[in-house]
Image: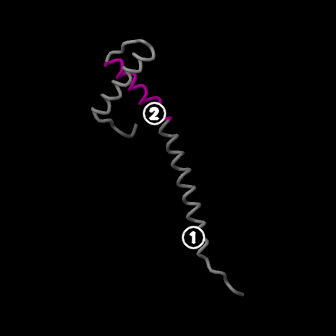
Amino acid sequence: MFFKLTKEQQQVMISDIQSFFTDERDEELSEFAAERVLDFVKETLAPHFYNAAVLDVKRVVEERYASLEDEILTLERPIKR
């Protein structure tokens, strides 16, 4: 991906993965195994979420641009002929 997690962020995520496996699957996961799950998510799944976010931002920018364009057009003065 385009960003690097801090050690603290990565450790929190690893801990969250371990908790998830314990709570949801009744399965103890080592730190190494949880780190592998995190690597899988970052490499395989995160790009899908990232691209979805980019599309969301694109829509918001297009809406704002259209709104701005409408506001600018209201400033036009009529031309008498």
Crowd tier of the residue under label 1, counting other residues whose Cα lies within 10 Å: few below 14, some 14–19, many 20 or above: few
Name the N-terminal-most of marks 2 and 1: 2
Q: Is residue 59 placed above or below 29 in the rendered structure?
A: below
- Kind of residue indicated by mark 2: Ala
Q: Which residues are magenta?
A: 31-48
Image spot of residue 57 (x, y percent) = 51, 48
- The residue wearing badge 1 is 72
Quadrant for the N terminus in the image = top left
Kindly identify the residue that appears in the image at 58 percent across and 75 percent down.
75
Residue 10 falls in which quadrant of the image?
top left
Kindly identify the residue that appears in the image at 60 percent across and 66 percent down.
70
Q: Secondary structure at mark 1?
A: helix
Mark 2 vs mark 1, CA separation in Å: 38 Å
Quadrant for the C terminus in the image = bottom right
Q: Residue 15 in magenta? A: no
Between 63 and 46, the one nearer to me in the picture: 63
Crowd tier of the residue under label 2, counting other residues whose Cα lies within 10 Å: few below 14, some 14–19, many 20 or above: some
- Kind of residue indicated by mark 1: Ile
Image spot of residue 46 (x, y percent) = 45, 33
Q: Secondary structure at mark 2?
A: helix
Q: Is residue 61 placed above or below 37 in the rendered structure?
A: below
- The residue wearing badge 2 is 46
Between 46 and 22, the one nearer to me in the picture: 22
Image position of 14 (left or right of 75) = left
Residue 28 falls in which quadrant of the image?
top left
